[in-house]
Image: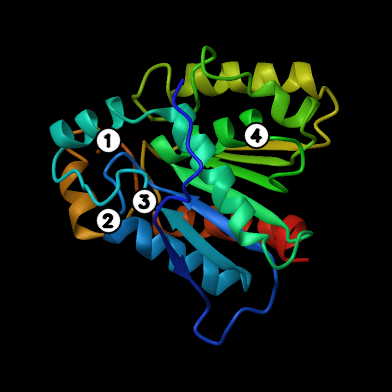
Amino acid sequence: MSTTSAIPPFLSFKPSGGTSSKGAIIVVQEWWGLNDQIKEHAQHVATNTGCEVVVPDLYKGKIGVNAEEASHLMNNLDFKLAVQEMELICGDLRKHESDRKIGIAGFCMGGALTMAAVAMSPAGCYQACAPFYGIPPAMLCDVGDIVSSKKTPVQGHFGDLDPLEGFSDKGAVNQLEATLSKADPDKKLWELYRYEKESHAFMNTDEFSASQRAPMKFDAGAFDPETQALAWSRLFDFMKKHVAA
């Protein structure tokens, strides 16, 4: 397995009025890379939580301009190394304040990496975990560890019309729910939200993302602004409670 001691490149986003919390949130990219949409998401999270938000550049400057390129980039990404890199970012974020709270949220590939990061990093590394439509494979990590041994709160967001079988479709979410239920039967540390009229990547709103919906077969979803606003509000409240407080 590859290892690294070098902090990876990342972008930092802060609320326009300055941070109102010493907490920080890592936002993890989709399979496209560090594109305009993920930057927009990061700024939105910073503005609405008062936290500094950082986005690791896991592809080191590369961006997928179509599905073929994005698939190639994702398939060549060392997920275990990416988890290590994000752990190093946590260390960097805490270099002046060792007790700084850090949450992590991600979308698509980043959703899967969000859960993998918490499951595979030392306990206490992250204080909140919020995956959107992405679940890591069981051979990479046991997501049950997030709530059982790491004791980290989880808030997941998934669309019922998501077609990505085994990754974020209804069956995969059912399996995720079963795993979390087994690890925490009383649901003290986790909640999953399902949006019945939404498909994959339903939080994306930019022109490029819209152009990819039909080719990727995501166009069955409503991409409803009210649903997006609801999901954002849930995420903001979750991060304010566990990270910004």
Secondary structure of the residue carrying numbered label 4: loop
Q: Nearer the viewer, mark 1 or mark 2?
A: 2
| Picture quadrant where residue 238 is located | bottom right
Disc 1 from disc 4: Cα separation? 32 Å
Disc 3 from disc 1: Cα separation? 25 Å
Circle number at residue 35? 2
Circle number at residue 218? 1
Provide residue 153's location: percent of width, then percent of height.
74, 41
Provide residue 25's location: percent of width, then percent of height.
59, 58
Kindly give the residue lying farthest to the top in the view shown.
139
Tell whether 201 sits left or right of 117: left
| Picture quadrant where residue 199 is located | top left
Disc 1 from disc 2: Cα separation? 19 Å
Which residue type carries mark 4? Answer: Ser
**Number of numbered discs overlaid on the protein picture:** 4
Q: Residues within 10 Å of mark 2 (few under 14, many from 20)?
A: some
Q: Earlier in the sequence, mark 1 or mark 2?
A: 2
Disc 4 from disc 2: Cα separation? 26 Å
Q: Nearer the viewer, mark 1 or mark 4?
A: 4
Q: Earlier in the sequence, mark 3 or mark 2?
A: 2
Q: Which residue is mark 3?
A: 57
Q: Earlier in the sequence, mark 1 or mark 4?
A: 4
Q: Residues within 10 Å of mark 3 (few under 14, many from 20)?
A: many
Circle 3/circle 1 CB separation < 8 Å = no
Circle 4/circle 2 CB separation < 8 Å = no
Provide residue 208's location: percent of width, then percent of height.
18, 54
Tell whether 176 sits left or right of 64: right
